[in-house]
Amino acid sequence: MRFRLILFTLAALAAAAPVRAGAGSPSIPRFWQTLADCETSGRWDWGARHRPGEGQTFVGGLGIYAPNWAAWRMHVGVRGPAWRATPAAQVRVAEWGWRHERAWWGCFAKVGTPTV
């Protein structure tokens, strides 16, 4: 019984924690993690709770313009809002936008552009 309580508590804490892939995450290419760190301080759930300084204009860890997110996500099979998508799914959407729409992020001036 005590073991179940510990597992339940750990699961609840993990669910409540902010989504952050981390610089060493193998699923997120270094470029995209660096861009997220610049755009939203690596907050992959950006725009979820509309914290001070966050809004609905730019969403997810990469700060994708919300109308672009709505249009691009369908091309790569991602559903729902950016802040609910995994970091890997957000990167797939951003890569699609970069390749097909030549999307531009403000932090490109600091981190360069992707090589996809």
Image: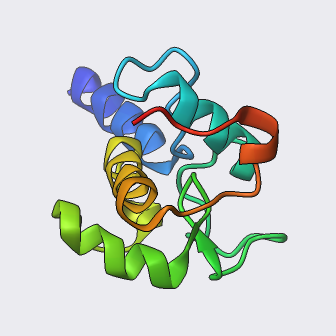
Q: Which picture quadrant has residue 45?
A: bottom right
Q: Is residue 65 left or right of residue 88?
A: right
Q: Judge whether 12 appears above or below 63 on screen.
A: above
Q: Judge whether 114 appears above or below 58 on screen.
A: above
Point 34% across, 26% down: residue: 27
For the residue pair 82 and 2, the one nearer the viewer reads as 82
For the residue pair 13 and 113, the one nearer the viewer reads as 113
How did the renderer colour the structure? Answer: rainbow
Point 47% across, 32% down: residue: 115
Residue located farthest toward the left when viewing the structure as drawn: 77
Q: Position of residue 91 (x, y in %)?
A: 40, 46
Q: Is residue 51 left or right of residue 36?
A: right
Q: Which picture quadrant has residue 14?
A: top left
Point 57% across, 52% down: residue: 61
Q: Quadrant of the N terminus?
A: top left
Q: Position of residue 74 (x, y in %)?
A: 22, 73
